[in-house]
Image (spheres, helix red, strand yellow):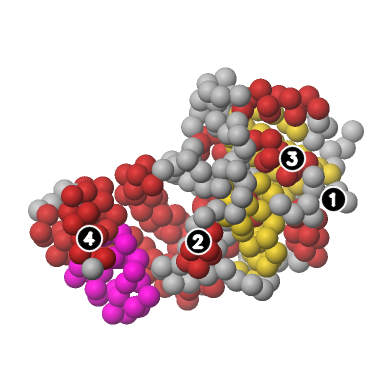
Amino acid sequence: MEDKTLVSVHMVTYNHEPFIREAIEGVLKQKTSFQYELLIGEDCSTDRTLEICKEYALKYPHIIKLHAREKNMGMVPNFYDLLLKCKGKYVAFCEGDDVWIDEYKLQKQVEFLEKNPDFSGACSKVKLIDENSNEHVNSKNFLKHLKTINESIDISLDYYLSRPYSEKELIFTPTLIVRKEVIPFDKLPNYSMFSDSVIRHHSLVKGSIKYFKDEMAAYRQHSGGITHTQHMTKHFLVIHELELLYKDLYESSTSEHLKEKIRKKIQSFQVIKILWEKKNLFIKIFKYCLMSLTLVIKKYSSFKFFFVNLKIWFYVNYPKVHKTLKRLFKR
């Protein structure tokens, strides 16, 4: 029998017992004129996540393909292995603690992509929720920093690279769907920190991503997620992988205009890495300030970016100094 699966929904999960039902239900509630599958990569959770996934897989065998790992693979290997198993022309993403809140999400996005073959994917406005699925207390502040766009737009790589350094991510993973053909399967194994960001950036090299102004998915912030401290201690690795990612983009791009923008991003990441070098403290602080100031003069919007990275470095390496500086700047 011919497989008519048009969309593969990619869901990785680990210790998401309080949220996994809502995540799965959000996918199952999708009203579409086409066939889709839900692939779940369950990474040996220590709670009841696997039990709940099995319950749904037995109830919806025609939709759900459960891949229960025999041993914990880790976030990125689990993500990549599940991606290889996706059969659809399109791949949509929803992690086990996020949720789709628009039952026509897939239908709207796929209809657009079928009519616009030059676009590599689609995303939408995102909602921030807490562990009880209510609007998060930081929602207004989150949207303020995100500078949410209230109209449907086309996100090109040029537009994406031109956004101010201080603005938060615009393309959130639970809202994203891409053509499977634009996913850089050969590049993904080179990264150990993130995969969704690699897909997002490389998709933009192949074509624009349509941004829908409607809230189609919710991104959850909760106590069981990656904590602020955990994120900060891994910050250097994140910067290192972002540098690697932009070097890949530089090689993939054919536009000299875009290459120049990408080169400036790479230069910024290289300046941040100065802080993490094993050199004399005062020398590297001086070097960092001098190099970052040089780039800020060329693009003032990067000031906050370099300042925040300096604060993160102090937070991780000199927490007492960080607290003192925080008190001083509050005055």
Residue found 27% across the figure and 58% down from its top: 311
Q: In the image, what residue type sits under mark 4?
A: Arg
Q: Mark 4 = which residue?
A: 327
Comparing 216 with 295, the one in front is 216
N-terminal of the pair, mark 2 or mark 4, is 2
Looking at the image, do the residues carrying marks 3 and 2 touch, with CB atoms under 8 Å apart?
Answer: no
Disc sitting over residue 142 in the figure:
2
Comparing 82 with 207, the one in front is 82
The CA distance from mark 1 to mark 3 is: 15 Å
The CA distance from mark 4 to mark 3 is: 46 Å
Q: In the image, what residue type sits under mark 2?
A: Phe
Comparing 290 with 114, the one in front is 290
Q: Is residue 239 left or right of residue 290?
A: right
Residue found 69% across the figure and 40% down from its top: 22
The part of the chain drawn in magenta is 289-310
Majority secondary structure of magenta residues: helix
Q: Mark 1 = which residue?
A: 32
Q: Is residue 157 visible?
A: no
N-terminal of the pair, mark 1 or mark 3, is 3
N-terminal of the pair, mark 3 or mark 2, is 3
Q: Closer to us: mark 2 or mark 4?
A: 4
The CA distance from mark 1 to mark 4 is: 54 Å
Q: In the image, what residue type sits under mark 3?
A: Glu
Residue found 57% across the figure and 20% down from its top: 70
Q: Residues within 10 Å of mark 3 (few under 14, many from 20)?
A: some
Q: Secondary structure at mark 1?
A: loop
Whole-percent x, y for residue 36 in the image: 79, 43
The CA distance from mark 2 to mark 4 is: 23 Å
Whole-percent x, y for residue 148 in the image: 57, 68
Q: Is residue 155 visible?
A: yes
Query: Quadrant of the image for the N terminus?
Result: top right
